Image (cartoon, rainbow, N blue to C red):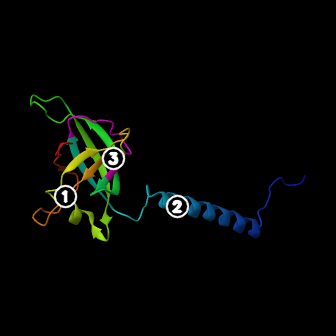
């Protein structure tokens, strides 16, 4: 009886490995070009609390002085409070670890503030705009809560 085992030649093995490596490189390039996933870049996680989400959602843009630097990772509903006008939602943001060649915490400082805004006049999407800090402020720490400024400020 003939054996039912199939042998794989060295040439077929090389082609298979080449195809798998090509697919892996293609996936990496697509994810890296989209800006959402870059395994080589560090991220800074920050938080901001607001009275209302106002259409803010996971994936919304985070900007520093109008320049896109990150995104909202999640929106958390805060527990009820006895304090009037207390924040009701917390936005957890992921910001690029390096902004224009400087560490993000050198640009975002303890005196930076977070404000909800709209990228267009239609206002159907919301974003968070962070004001740059001053030299007086300390570098912001991981998971720091940025103070909010009102929409009318």
Q: CA distance from mark 2 to mark 3?
A: 23 Å
**Residue 12, quarter of the rendered image:** bottom right
Main SS, magenta residues: loop
Report the span colored magenta. Answer: 50-62
Mark 1 or mark 3, earlier in chain: 3
Side of 102 where 37 appears, left or right: right
Labels 1, 3: front one: 3
Residue positioned 48% across, 57% down in the render: 34
Residue positioned 37% across, 45% down in the render: 120
Q: Give the residue pinned by disc 3.
A: 72
The picture places residue 146, in percent across and down from the top left corner, at: 18, 50
Residue positioned 19% across, 58% down in the render: 141
Side of 80 where 95 appears, left or right: right
Mark 2 or mark 1, earlier in chain: 2
Badge 2 vs badge 1, beta-carbon distance below 8 Å = no
The picture places residue 136, in percent across and down from the top left corner, at: 9, 64
Labels 2, 3: front one: 3
Mark 2 or mark 3, earlier in chain: 2
Decide which of 35, 44 is in the foreground and name it: 35
Look at the numbered disc 3 and give the secondary structure of its residue.
Answer: strand
The picture places residue 42, in percent across and down from the top left corner, at: 34, 62
Look at the numbered disc 2 and give the secondary structure of its residue.
Answer: helix
Q: Give the residue pinned by disc 1.
A: 141
130 part of magenta stretch: no
Look at the numbered disc 1 and give the secondary structure of its residue.
Answer: loop
Q: Give the residue pinned by disc 2.
A: 28
Classify mark 1: residues with Cα within 10 Å, few (<14), some (14-19) or many (20+).
some
């Amino acid at each position: 009886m003939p054996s039912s085992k199939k042998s794989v030649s060295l040439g077929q093995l090389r082609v298979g490995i080449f195809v798998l490596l090509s697919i892996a490189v293609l996936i990496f390039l697509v994810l890296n070009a989209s800006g959402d996933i870059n395994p080589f870049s560090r991220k800074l996680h920050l938080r901001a609390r607001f009275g209302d989400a106002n259409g803010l959602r996971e994936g919304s843009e985070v900007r520093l002085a109008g320049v896109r630097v990150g995104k909202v990772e999640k929106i958390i509903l805060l527990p009820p409070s006895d304090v009037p006008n207390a924040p009701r939602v917390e936005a957890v943001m992921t910001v690029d670890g390096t902004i224009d060649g400087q560490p993000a915490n050198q640009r975002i400082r303890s005196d930076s503030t977070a404000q909800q805004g709209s990228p267009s006049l239609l206002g159907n999407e919301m974003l968070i705009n962070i004001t740059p800090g001053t030299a007086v402020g300390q570098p912001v720490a991981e998971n720091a809560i940025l103070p909010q400024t009102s929409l009318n400020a």
